[in-house]
């Protein structure tokens, strides 16, 4: 009997099948937070689905990795793959043609819109004059040493940022502990296993925890009210 579409079992099963990639319990729990399903319930559901054969799983030491059953997907043969590649090439060509046509239309619309009427020119001039006046007022305040951001507002922002950085650091530490345990008991090379599981480090996406931590420290050293 198929599970109800709104049951925890159906939600987890659909997610695993839709992702069709290796997942651990934390991956699934993080992705399904909006359904208010507890991590323990997700763990139990994943184990039940694996035990019943509706999903596959592999064990790496104490870590379980779950993935969709591949035999439920239609795997095309070489002839079908060639047809799909040809269709994809044709679609890509059509897409480029459509993009070019859209760009031409947008350029024409932009050109037409740039030709303002006298009334629109006068209205725009008035708006720009107001913007310039506002900027001059702010500049005058800054030159006079007036603080545009209050100490309370600054502290509130720094508090939120500090909390987020603490959570970031905690999650990095938790991941390192799990990863060390996983790779210690795995016969695979850590780099290969990381690529297989689709894991990305901060550096891979161009971010640095240290740079944000330094930002907090710089803010604390800067005199308040400036």
Image (cartoon, helix red, strand yellow):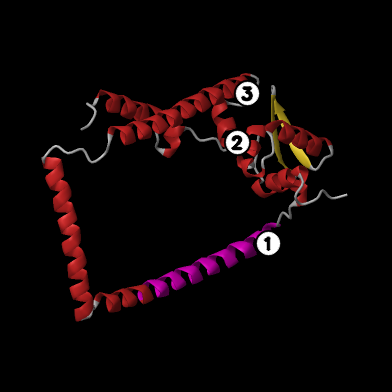
Expressed as whole percent of the image width and height from the top left, the position of residue 60 reads 68, 26
Report the side of 25 relative to 93 (left or right): right
Expressed as whole percent of the image width and height from the top left, the position of residue 199 reads 55, 35
- Label 2 sits on a secondary structure element that is helix
* Residue at screen point 21% across, 72% down: 123
Q: Nearer the viewer, residue 11 or 66?
A: 11
Indicate which label's residue lies in the foreground, 2 or 1. 2
**Is the Cβ of the residue at disc 3 closer than 8 Å to that at disc 2?**
no
Indicate which label's residue lies in the foreground, 1 or 3. 3
* Residue at screen point 40% across, 37% down: 206
- Label 3 sits on a secondary structure element that is helix
In the displayed structure, 210 sits above or below 71; it is above
Q: Earlier in the sequence, mark 3 or mark 2?
A: 3
- Label 1 sits on a secondary structure element that is helix
Report the side of 206 relative to 68 (left or right): left
Q: Nearer the viewer, residue 57 or 177?
A: 177
Residue neighbourhood size for the residue with mark 1, other residues' Cα within 10 Å, grouped as few (<14), some (14–19), many (≥20): few
Whether residue 208 is visible to the viewer of this picture, yes or no, is no
Residue neighbourhood size for the residue with mark 3, other residues' Cα within 10 Å, grouped as few (<14), some (14–19), many (≥20): some
Q: Nearer the viewer, residue 26 or 190?
A: 26
Majority secondary structure in the magenta region? helix
Label annotation for residue 197 = 2
Q: Earlier in the sequence, mark 1 or mark 3?
A: 1
* Residue at screen point 22% across, 80% down: 117
Q: In this picture, which residue range is highlighted in magenta?
A: 77-104
Residue marked by disc 1: 79
- Label 2, label 1: how far apart the Cα atoms are: 30 Å
Q: Earlier in the sequence, mark 2 or mark 1?
A: 1
Residue marked by disc 3: 182
Whether residue 170 is visible to the viewer of this picture, yes or no, is yes
Marker count (numbered): 3
- Label 3, label 2: how far apart the Cα atoms are: 12 Å
């Amino acid at each position: 009997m198929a599970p109800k579409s709104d049951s925890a079992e159906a939600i987890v099963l659909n997610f695993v099948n839709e992702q069709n990639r290796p997942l651990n319990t934390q991956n699934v729990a993080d992705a399904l937070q909006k359904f208010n399903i507890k991590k323990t319930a997700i763990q139990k559901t994943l184990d039940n689905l694996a035990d019943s054969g509706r999903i596959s799983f592999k064990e790496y030491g104490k870590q379980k990795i779950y993935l969709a059953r591949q035999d439920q997907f239609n795997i095309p043969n070489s002839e079908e793959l060639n047809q799909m590649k040809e269709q994809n090439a044709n679609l890509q060509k059509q897409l480029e043609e459509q993009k070019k046509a859209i760009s031409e239309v947008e350029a024409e619309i932009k050109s037409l819109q740039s030709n303002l009427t006298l009334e629109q020119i006068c209205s725009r001039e008035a708006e720009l004059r107001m913007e310039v006046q506002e900027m001059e007022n702010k500049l005058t305040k800054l030159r006079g040493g007036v603080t545009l951001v209050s100490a309370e507002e600054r502290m509130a922002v720094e508090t939120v940022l500090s909390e987020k950085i603490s959570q970031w650091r905690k999650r990095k530490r938790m991941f390192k502990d799990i990863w060390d345990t996983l790779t210690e008991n795995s016969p695979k090379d850590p780099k290969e296993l990381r690529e297989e599981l689709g894991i990305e480090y901060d550096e891979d996406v161009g971010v640095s925890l240290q740079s944000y931590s330094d930002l907090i420290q710089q803010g604390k050293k800067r005199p308040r009210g400036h």
